[in-house]
Amino acid sequence: MKPTAALLFSQDTSFAFTKTTEVLARACSTLGVPAYVRDSFDARAIWAVLEDVADGNPGAVRAAEEMIAETLSQLMDDAGVDCIIGLDLCWLFLPDLMVEHSGIKRIYSIWFDDFHSWLGAPTNRIFPARRHTHREILAHPRVRHCFYGEAMAHEAALFGYTNQVQSKLAAPRDYLDRTYPCTRRNKLAFLGNPGSRIPPSPAAIEAMDRGADLAELRNIARAEVLQTFHSGLFTWAQGIEGVIDLLAAATAAKCASPHISALQILQLCLPASPEAFEELNRKGGIYELAMVVKLVCRYDRPALVRRLYKADLCDVYSNPSEWSPYGVHAADTVMVDRLPEVYSSYFAHVNAANPLRDAPANEKLFEIAACGRTSINLWSPDVASCYDEGEVCFVRSLEEAESRARDLLREPDRALSLGKRARLRTAREHTWEHRLSALWALDPIWPKAPADSQLCDSSNQ
Amino acid sequence: MSALLTAEPTAASEPASERASSLVKPEGVVLLTQDVVTPAARTSEAIAGALRRAGIRTYVRDTALIRWMHDRLGDAPERKRDGWNLLTASKLKILVELGKCDTILGLDLYWMLSNDPFLEHPRVRQVVSLWYDDLRTCCVQLGGLGGRVDDFQARLRHAKVHHSFYGRRQCAEARSFGLERVTRSPLAAPAEYLALRKVPEPSRRRRLAFVGGPGGRTPPSREALVLMQARAEVRDLRVASLRETLEDPAVAQWSRGEPTVRPWLQAAMEAKLEAPSTPAVEHLLAAGSSYPRALAYLEEKGEMLDAALLVKLVLRYDRPALVHRLHSRGLVDVYSAPWFWKPFGIESAPTVRFPDLPALYQSYAAHLNAGYSVREAVVNEKLFEIAACGRLSFNLSDDEIGEHFALGSEVEAHATFREIEESIRWYLGKPESLRESGERARERVRRCHTWDHRVAAVFGLPKSWESHP
């Protein structure tokens, strides 16, 4: 049915993590599971600091491990914690502590980011003695990787992490109860950054200016990727014959099938250069290559937003400096506590995924809907599995997106009725309480759930 | 002995009110805890729950690792130490900024980090120390870190810092040592306990439970143990403790510097014996009029807190002797770390994990409760938790208990061990009276003593607040 108590690991230096972790903790409490939130940043960063200090004093590292283990073990023991929940791998800093602790039955990694980005970040350090075992830990039967996109899940499976389950992101339940007036009926809004931080090329901007659509922009991005390869910037590929053939085939395939995961595409393109694939795989370069393949779609999000912004149909909120290379003047980032108010103040929104994650059904999709507003989305199987047309709007091109935005602007009340339906669907299926209940119901380690679920249908709102 | 606080011998001012008028409703709270001291973690979570129910965004964070690492880096290159301090302080600043937290709460002094991220932060309007332990113990525990916190005393007295103590005597002590913005806010019970409705287990209807250690880790003297075995009364044990405490090496050391220290301390301890409800520091100040040189000597050394501790120790056997007497009569089961009780000849059941506490409270028909002499505050968390679970508790008399519960109706409090034992025996023969008293205690907690009430009172939130009996 459910765990006895959950320990959730957060990451205070990245506030989206903190927000979602706190929401997950509230969901645990609603479901009757005491939840303890702790930031694991210190535990992950401590090794980076100790590395120099530990020269000639390896005992310092061991002592740090013992200290962390003592602190957390005591909390786990005394609070009866049997379930660990961490966004991405926030729990991985001292893996043995989690997987070998007798009280812990399950560790849920709720993936936000991708393996490559997480493991490559300088502060996400695993204690040195454990580094060589991290693959076994990630594949440990107590660990359950929860992926919100099919492509993400597939990618992880190809890396050998089959201890996984697909579990979509969701909305905070309390958003369903909040009511704010819709004060802006003359524009849509987009909340978020452009995705990739690589600035756009002049060719891409020129194409966007003349109204180029997704297919052309993806081809431009592909050409840029191949050009970068030839310039030798991809050092991980140096000395490996045939990588360019593999990359050319994979990026072409990604242009044609953007909803297939980059890694799956690479596997399909393996005949183009099997030796290169094998060597890259052996050296761990497949992560990098997959990331490069994903870059083919890097203009999808900024081009969609830019087009609507330039047509004076959309306000943009984010870190202004990230949008300035696109000629978009963004308003400042909306703080977490104001999100529902800002979502509600617009009659409809634009939503687009970060292509680097290969998973389009992002958190905003659910949050906008929970606030009773509809969103325009590029069609994808992931988003279509969460909401139907009539709750959100699906488009397959930038031109269609502009046209739908104008339609909605002409009939804002109709847009609001779509939003109402999206909210009802969210109340029925897409809160974090639903996700946790479903995860726990799947696991035979927790007693079976009784027929009368503790979740309430909020469809009367 | 520590010399962390310099005594400022101002007399204790008027009794603290329940509410610190200058505290405002928080927009968001960072609540700093210490997971290696689990009661702190448990209470932090209970307070966080109450804040969240009041609509206040609250983030609980543990600081154990930050402190440990700081100490560990003591001999490391300055660059490394600064790097760690910067890293951890930056992280907390980010939480304050993006979480829009204007209030920092820390049990005891867990908010005080060597590289302070809070006091000068423009977003932070108020920092509240919710004192759990006593002033001296906290100062000594933080000594490792405090030794490197050059402005330790200035931070304690910073204009943004408020101190909330749960006992009247703690407040008096803090004020007499120059702390400002001191208010009194009693401990409380988690609201969730109120909903539990289990009847006592049949095998536990003729016995009470005592959950806790003997208070302090110093083993009892042979004389004290003999007195306990002879079922001596509370006053006899206090007299024995007074004699032992006067032989403390610190007394001899101080006396070498100022010969009147010993008679001064003896006078204060004897006063404590007669008036145990009066704060130790007040006894010291009062006795100081007869021994002004001794008082001045300890003030100058900045060791008044250490002297106050010795005076408090006059009551150190109250708790273990009461438990010992009732346990030896087969009236009380004891739950705690067994090695704490072993020197007293008591076989204790293992410590109760905090999620299991309410179930344990409910499994017995009644409980024994006793304060910890060093904290000089008998109105501990257990008093409220037992009541919240609908159970009657038996206590040694103290004037502060009656401020929170109706004596003889919601809790029992008696001046001697014998009276407590008689009262327990009487109640155990009348299970219906026991049940009714427990329910009245629970009702009192529901109306006045959950953490939700405390949060509302401390921050002046609009909430019904019924008067005490």
Image (tube, coloured by chain):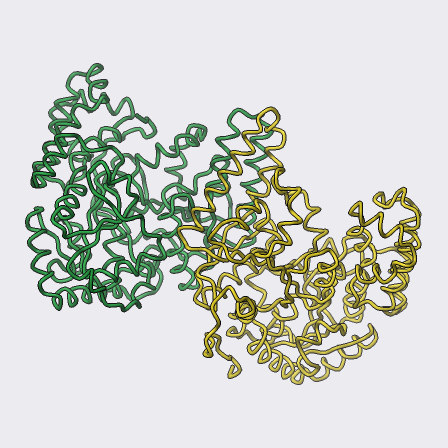
Chain colours: A yellow, B green
- x%, y% of residue B99? 53, 55
Horizontal arrangement in the rendering, residue A403 relative to residue B191 (left or right): right
Horizontal arrangement in the rendering, residue A123 relative to residue B110 (left or right): right
- x%, y% of residue A272? 92, 58
Judge by depth and name the residue closer to the eye, B437 or A281: A281
Tell me which residue sits at (78%, 76%) in the image: A395
Judge by depth and name the residue closer to the eye, B140 or A132: A132
Query: Against A243, is B142 above or below?
Result: above
Quarter residue B275 falls in: top left
Furthest residue in direction top, as rendered: B256
Tell me which residue sits at (19%, 64%) in the image: B438
Horizontal arrangement in the rendering, residue A326 relative to residue B1 (left or right): right
Judge by depth and name the residue closer to the eye, B443 or B337: B337
Tell me which residue sits at (11%, 28%) in the image: B267
- x%, y% of residue B171? 25, 43
Quarter residue A192 falls in: bottom right
Query: Against B263, is B106 above or below?
Result: below
Q: How many marks?
A: 0
- x%, y% of residue A141? 59, 57
Tell me which residue sits at (10%, 59%) in the image: B408
